Image (cartoon, rainbow, N blue to C red):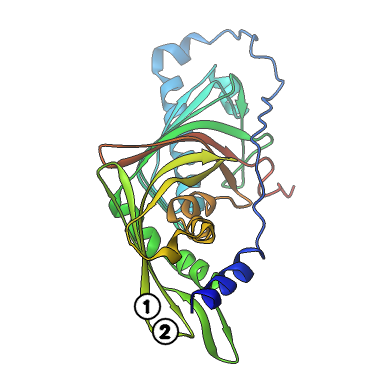
C-alpha cells in the first residue's frame, strides 16, 4: 500500500512546475517639481478639499466594483488643476476585510510607492496609464483561513490535485483543517485512495516563510508515528494545497498583482507585507 501511494504522489507532483515571480516597479517619469499657483478662491472656499473627497469616493467605488470589498481611500494631491488631470502625490487605502475570490485578509493597509501617480477618469470608470504600485500590510486570521478552505476556488484546487480513472477515485484530498495555534500553523489533511474507503490523515505543524514571492511552509513537523508521512513527497504536496499561499495567488488577475516580501506568525495572527499593483491600461479607453 505504501509503495502504491508513493507512486501516485510521484506522478501527481511531477506534473506541476512552480514559476518564480519578480516585482519590478517603474515609477512614472512625469515631473513632480511643477509648482502651480492656487487661486485664492480654492483656498478660501475649501474647493480643494471637496474635489479631493469626490475623487476618493470614485476610487472607493471602482475598487468595490473590481474587488468586491469595501475600501477607504485617502488622496494626497498636488493642486486642484493637477487632480483634474488625474495626477496626485499619494493614495492610501484601508479595508477592514477583503473578500475577493479565495482571498481573505483583515486590516489591509496600502500606500502608493511612487512620488507621482496618475489615473484617468472617463465615462464613469477609472483607467490606469501606468502601473499603480502600493506597499501593503495585512493580517490573516483563523476565520480568514476557514473561509479560504471553504471557498469555491480552493475546493476546485483540491479537485485539481486529485484524480480518478474510469470513474474510480485514485487519489483524493478532502478539505483539510488548518488552524493557527501557539504561533504555528497546524494541518490535518484527510486523503482517500483506491486502496482505502476511509480517509487517513496527515497531521503536522509548520512555520511560514517567503520564497520566490510566495508564502511556503517551513520547518514541517509531522505529528504521527507513521513512517510514510516522513517522505519528502508529502512536504511538496502540502505546499501544493497551502491555503495561505493559494489565497494570495488568487488575486493575481488581469486587474492586479500581489507580491509577498515578508510573513510572520505573531499572537496567532499571520502578518504579511508586500507589494500590490493595479495593472497598467486595464480596461482600455474607447474614445
Q: Is residue 279 above or below residue 101?
A: above
* Neighbour tally class for label 2: few under 14, some 14-19, many 20 plus, Cα within 10 Å: few
- Which of the labelled discs sits on residue 267, or is there none? none
122 relative to 232, above or below: above
Q: Is residue 54 visible?
A: no
Q: Are marks 1 and 2 in contact (CB under 8 Å)?
A: yes
| Residue that label 1 marks | 199
In the rendering, at what x and y percent does residue 119 appear?
Answer: 61, 34
Q: Residue 43 falls in which quadrant of the image? A: top left
Q: In 3D space, how far apart are the residues under numbered discs 1 and 2 (Cα atoms)?
A: 7 Å
Q: What residue sits 37% from the left and 74% below the top?
A: 200
Q: Is residue 100 above or below residue 87?
A: below
- Check the image and name the residue furthest to the bottom: 166
Left or right of 54, for residue 236 = right
How many marks do you count on the picture? 2
SS label for mark 1:
strand
Residue identifier under label 2: 196
Amino acid at each position: 500500500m505504501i509503495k502504491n501511494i508513493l507512486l501516485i504522489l510521484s506522478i501527481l507532483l511531477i506534473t506541476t512546475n512552480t514559476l518564480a515571480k519578480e516585482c519590478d516597479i517603474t515609477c512614472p517619469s512625469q515631473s513632480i517639481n511643477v509648482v502651480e499657483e492656487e487661486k485664492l478662491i480654492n483656498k478660501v472656499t475649501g474647493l480643494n478639499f471637496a474635489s479631493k473627497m469626490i475623487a476618493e469616493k470614485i476610487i472607493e467605488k471602482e475598487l468595490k466594483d473590481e474587488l468586491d470589498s469595501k475600501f477607504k481611500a485617502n488622496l494626497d494631491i498636488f493642486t486642484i488643476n493637477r487632480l483634474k488631470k488625474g495626477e496626485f502625490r499619494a493614495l492610501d487605502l484601508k479595508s477592514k476585510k477583503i473578500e475577493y475570490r479565495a482571498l481573505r485578509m483583515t486590516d489591509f493597509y496600502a500606500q502608493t510607492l511612487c512620488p507621482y501617480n496618475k489615473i484617468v477618469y472617463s465615462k464613469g470608470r477609472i483607467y490606469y496609464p501606468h502601473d499603480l504600485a502600493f506597499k501593503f500590510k495585512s493580517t490573516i486570521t483563523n476565520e480568514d483561513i476557514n473561509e479560504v478552505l471553504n471557498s469555491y476556488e480552493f475546493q476546485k484546487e483540491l479537485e485539481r490535485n486529485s484524480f480518478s480513472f474510469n470513474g474510480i477515485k485514485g487519489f483524493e484530498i478532502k478539505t483539510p483543517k488548518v488552524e493557527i495555534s501557539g504561533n504555528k500553523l497546524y494541518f490535518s489533511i484527510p486523503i482517500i485512495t483506491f486502496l482505502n474507503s476511509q480517509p487517513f490523515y496527515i497531521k503536522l505543524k509548520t512555520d511560514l516563510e517567503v520564497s520566490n514571492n510566495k508564502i511556503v511552509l517551513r520547518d514541517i513537523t509531522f505529528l504521527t508515528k507513521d513512517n510514510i508521512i516522513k517522505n519528502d513527497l508529502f512536504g511538496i504536496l502540502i505546499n501544493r494545497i497551502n491555503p495561505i499561499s493559494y489565497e494570495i495567488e488568487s488575486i493575481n488577475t488581469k486587474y492586479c498583482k500581489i507580491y509577498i516580501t515578508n510573513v510572520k506568525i505573531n499572537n496567532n495572527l499571520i502578518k504579511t507585507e508586500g507589494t500590490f499593483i493595479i495593472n497598467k491600461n486595464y480596461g482600455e479607453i474607447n474614445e
